[in-house]
Amino acid sequence: MRLLMHPHFDPVPFVFVALAWSGFQAYVGGIAGGFICDSARGNEWGVAQRKTRFVAYVLAHGSFYFLCSVSGFMACWVLSRLAVEVNDWSKVEGGTGAVMIALGSIMIAGISGALPRILHLGGKP
């Protein structure tokens, strides 16, 4: 967190790492979507159904995982900007503290790749 609060912090490496990691998460989501489709339907696919499988499962899950990972990095960015503005942590109000805790939770879940799985389950274990 100290690196993000540095006054000469350059956001370009942060954005590059965020997009690279989110691209990897999109790849993982695409594989997961293809596995979900294959386990439900088997390998009885024609050419037209393979395109449908790609669009409906692989591309949809991949883009969902990408957006969830990007939201984690955005929460990290907003949280770091909020943390820079705090001069005295003992005077942080309850609402600001709650927002910071929520942003921290979204950041951890989004970057780690757990957020799309939580949203797919609907919060159920």
Image (tube, grey):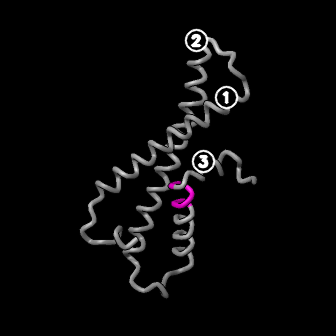
Residue 107 point in image, percent of width and height:
51, 60
Taking 5 as reference, is 51 left or right?
right
Answer few, some or many: residues within 10 Å of disc 2's Cα (few below 14, many 20 plus, some between 14 and 19): few
Q: Which residues are magenta?
A: 106-111
Q: CA distance from mark 3 to mark 1?
A: 17 Å
Could you tell which of marks 3 and 1 lies nearer the N-terminus?
1
Residue 114 point in image, percent of width and height:
60, 53
46 and 120: which is toward the camera? 46
Answer few, some or many: residues within 10 Å of disc 1's Cα (few below 14, many 20 plus, some between 14 and 19): some
User: SS class of the residue under badge 3?
Assistant: helix
Residue 25 point in image, percent of width and height:
50, 44
What kind of residue is marked 1?
A: Cys
What kind of residue is marked 3?
A: Pro
Residue bearing mark 2: 47
Q: Residue at x 54, y 68 (%)?
A: 99
Residue bearing mark 3: 116
Residue 37 is marked as: 1
Q: CA distance from mark 1 to mark 2?
A: 15 Å
> Farthest right residue?
125
In which quarter of the view is residue 60 placed? Answer: top right
User: SS class of the residue under badge 1?
Assistant: helix
Residue 11 point in image, percent of width and height:
30, 58
Q: Residue at x 40, y 46 (%)?
A: 20
